[in-house]
Amino acid sequence: MKKTIGNIFVGLLYLILYLPLLVMVVFSFNAGSSTSVFKGLSFKWYVELFTNSTDVGVPVRNTLILAVISAVIATVIGTAAAVYIYYVRSKLWKNTLNTVTNIPMMNPDIVTGVSLMLLFVFVGRLVGAVNSLNFFTLLIAHITFNIPYVILNVLPKLNQTDPHLAEAAQDLGSTPTESFFRVVLPAIMPGVTSGFMMAFTLSLDDFIISYYTTGTDFQTLPLYIFNMVKKPVKPHIYALYSIIFLLVLAVLLFTNISGMKDKKEKK
Amino acid sequence: MKKILSVMLVILMAAVPLTFSACGANAAIEEPRAVYTRDYAGTTLNVFNWGVYISDGSEGTLNVNKAFENLTGIHVNYTTFESNEAMYAKLKSGAVSYDVVIPSDYMIERLISEDMVQPLDFSKLTNYDLIDDSYKGVFYDPDNRYSVPYNVGMVGLIYNTTMVEGTPDSWAVMWDEKYADQILTFDNPRDAFAIAQFLIGVDVNSENKADWDAAADKLKEQNKVLQGRVMDQVFAKMEGGNAAIAPYYAGDYLVMVENNEDLAFCYPKEGTNIFMDAACVPKNAQNYEAAMLYINFLMEPEVALANAEYICYASPNTAVINNPEYEYYENEILYPDPETLPPTEYFHDIDPEIRSYYEKLWESVLLAD
């Protein structure tokens, strides 16, 4: 009895989680343009997405470029910062650094967005720029909100490693740089990777901060879709999202399967 | 882990060129009416327009921006906004410079009064003679110096004939208790107030607070019959038969009726809102000459036709209106007979004090039972 209730509960939970996605995927195969009337099965919108030179290609490309670049830079800076925080001796200084790292994550996006915009506009006026908001301000904004998440992913991994590992490597004759890249970095690599993934996905779907910091030349997909408020969202957007969803699913499955294999090998 | 990451990136990167593959099938117009110089090839033009408001090459339509790029060699940086107010905020911040913006009437009035747009060089806009005279000299730009009309539209009443008895011809039906929980209205104060204002017979641009109070009282009465306040959700609701009555733009009704034949449309007898979106050039534009080329290009018969059929709003361009091949040629909803059409009223830019007053009233309407 308890088991059935549990199963029903879990079933309902996943239904609620995945039903919207399912509806979206179904409507991406709609022959008509409506979002509520299903006119028959068709691959029309997928063909549309891939063959026609619709404008949606530009925001998609922009979003990916921004996500990759900002995630890479944030990962480098964030990892370096985590290593520094790890080696800090003073407890007070360490706690301060940890708290300062956490504040931007707790901060509502809108506050981060508006304050970044004010800063950019202020600096822009100071140097007399015509477009104080542009691709680089957007990039800086994304790197900024990504860094704390990278630090948060790397620090625990560092804490798990033996603090004397790097010293041992240096005892055996490697330079400090070598010992970092050949001993410490491989040990914390899983943390760095998950930090990168997190930064990548956060950047991919950020709307609020981008809304305030973007300029004339660079519009990301979330902004592009938000601006469709007056008109119905076209089904080729559903097709695009269905593909993104499938990609994410594929990556997750791949990660989990290879993760299971790794564990087996270790055993 | 590294492997997974690289695989993921490869997949994503591979997906980009696919979605971005521009076949360019519909990226040229056949016979340009005006002459387009390539003197500005290689420069960049920043265009700021409403979302989903230009023919973009989907479903075999003309890709207007690509066609312009191919013709002139000017790179078009095309971005979108979701409301006049969002556009204004971006422009006012002074942090960005656009060369062409396409806001609505009352917003252009504000931009002109705040000296944020500059006069256009009509000697270069050789296609301007195509614009219908009835759309020239409108209140926001009485001397035709700052703007070129892009699209016109009117608000009307959309209803489902299987759910509504007879043929409504008045905004009063939106207060009818027979249709409780089946009525939708606009989710923004100006449009929602306008309906109440037309119904009780007050000026939509009134500077008198008492008029706004009266309209707010009328709106509060409506709360008990409303199903919800919507913008683009109106498409799904009306097409799916989930609501009986909704006010929306005439052109959008034409899209809805394709998906649900039971829908009908009328212009209520009390009068309705008319709007016009027009192209302007902001004061701090960096590429004025290219902006002139672009605005002229938007008036090209082929371009205007593609846009009119894509956006489904009424065109101010005579080359479109008088073209028998135009999908909505002599369409009674987009181009109603002026003789039988109820009075129409543009929104004007309202005094900031009144604006904040009605915004406060709007909140009280939202909170009232």
Image (tube, rainbow, N blue to C red):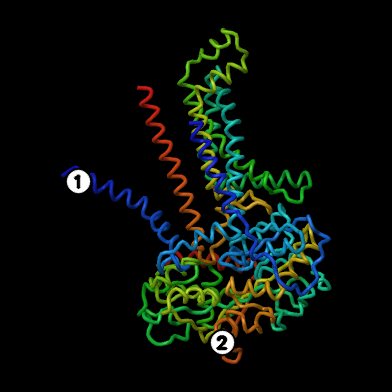
Q: CA distance from mark 1 to mark 2?
A: 63 Å
Q: Is residue A49 above or below residue B326?
A: above
Task: Give a yes or no on whether discs 1 and 2 share a subunit.
Answer: no
Q: Is residue B224 visible?
A: no
Residue type highlighted by circle 2:
Pro
Q: Chain of mark 2?
A: B
Judge left or right: residue B33 versus residue B314. Answer: right
Q: Secondary structure at mark 2?
A: loop
Q: Could you say whether the residue bearing mark 1 is in a helix, strand or loop?
A: helix
* Residue B270 image position (x, y, % from top left): 53, 85
Residue at the spot x=59%, y=71% of the render? Answer: B311
Q: Chain of mark 1?
A: A
Residue in the image at 58% along x and 80% along y: B328
Question: Residue beneath label 2, please?
Answer: B342
- Residue that sits furthest to the left in the current view: A1
Name the residue beneath numbered marker 1: A4
Please, is residue B247 above or below residue A60 in the view?
below
Classify residue B344 by image quadrant.
bottom right
Image vertical order of residue B37 relative to residue A91, above or below = below
The picture places residue B14, in percent across and down from the top left corner, at 56, 46
Q: Residue at x 54, y 23 (%)?
A: A185
